[in-house]
Image (cartoon, helix red, strand yellow):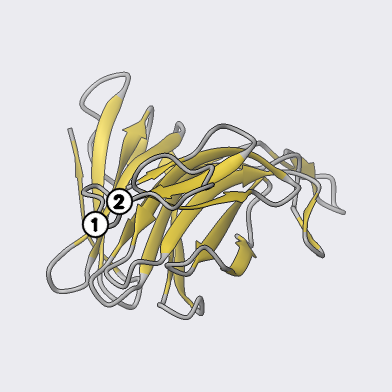
């Protein structure tokens, strides 16, 4: 399991310690490693341990992380550590303007899915046509090496959508859950505020949407 003191450290703990604590260690019993999070991370939204013992961290960020600028006022970053605590990569999610992460899931093959919510800035085209701000849930999937597999949004017609969770199916499909004040996937609105689940295959093609 992992614990993440806000704005300070990532700590990995063994659920059942298999070795005694080393003399002089500052880690608690069962501690595997503790690492300071990179500059630019403003909060940790979720973490998960992969089958090989590596640790994924989903964080909100601003400014820059390493040499990578964070788009908008706030963006979302994915950090991966090996089982010993070495930072393998930090990825700032592309295509977001003012975003927050919410949930992540790790599949048995080491691929990872990230769910969050992004709000775009209002804009005006060269011809003077305004585009209002929109708030939409999104899901992005990466393989075990960090290569992007797909990125999709779940826009809501006539309202907003926000992510609440993400999960892998046994066949590698991805399920995004969230809340909406509009219609997601052309579904009929059930009330002023609904929940939804949207499914995607391995390539990112939407397979179904249920709103309730």
Q: Nearer the viewer, mark 2 or mark 1?
A: 1
Q: How many marks?
A: 2
Give 81 or 185, whichever is nearer the viewer.
Answer: 81
**Coordinates of residue 110 in the picture (x, y in percent):** 33, 73
Please name the residue shown 69% across and 41% down the image: 74
Left or right of residue 95: residue 23 = left
Q: Which secondary structure lies at badge 1?
A: loop
Q: In the drawing, what numbered circle is on residue 101? A: none
Residue of label 2:
14
Give 15 or 110, whichever is nearer the viewer.
Answer: 15
Q: Which secondary structure lies at badge 2?
A: loop
**Coordinates of residue 82 in the picture (x, y in percent):** 47, 69
Residue of label 1:
18
Whether residue 102 is visible: no
Tags 2 and 1 in contact by the CB under 8 Å rule? Answer: yes
Q: Residues within 10 Å of mark 2 (few under 14, many from 20)?
A: some
Give 35 or 127, whichever is nearer the viewer.
Answer: 35
Please name the residue shown 50% across and 50% down the image: 58
Please name the residue shown 16% across and 64% down the image: 169
Left or right of residue 86: residue 145 = left
Left or right of residue 159: residue 124 = right
Give 52 or 144, whichever is nearer the viewer.
Answer: 52
């Amino acid at each position: 399991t992992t614990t993440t003191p806000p704005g300070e450290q990532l700590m990995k703990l063994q659920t059942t310690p298999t070795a005694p604590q080393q003399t002089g260690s500052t880690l608690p019993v069962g501690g595997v490693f503790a690492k300071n999070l990179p500059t630019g991370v403003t909060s940790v939204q979720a973490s998960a341990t992969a089958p090989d013992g590596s640790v994924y961290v989903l964080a909100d960020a601003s400014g820059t992380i390493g040499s990578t600028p964070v788009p908008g006022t706030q963006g979302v970053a994915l950090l991966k550590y090996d089982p010993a605590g070495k930072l393998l990569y930090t990825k700032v999610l592309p295509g977001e303007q003012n975003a927050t992460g919410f949930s992540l899931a790790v599949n048995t093959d080491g691929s990872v899915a990230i769910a969050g919510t992004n709000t775009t800035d209002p804009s005006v085209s060269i011809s003077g046509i305004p585009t209002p701000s929109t708030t939409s849930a999104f899901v992005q999937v990466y393989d075990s090496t960090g290569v992007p597999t797909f990125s999709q949004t779940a826009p809501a017609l006539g309202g907003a959508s926000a992510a609440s969770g993400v999960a892998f199916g046994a066949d590698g499909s991805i399920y995004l859950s969230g809340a909406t004040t509009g219609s997601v996937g052309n579904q009929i609105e059930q009330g002023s505020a609904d929940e939804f689940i949207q499914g995607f295959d391995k390539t990112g093609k939407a397979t179904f949407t249920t709103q309730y």
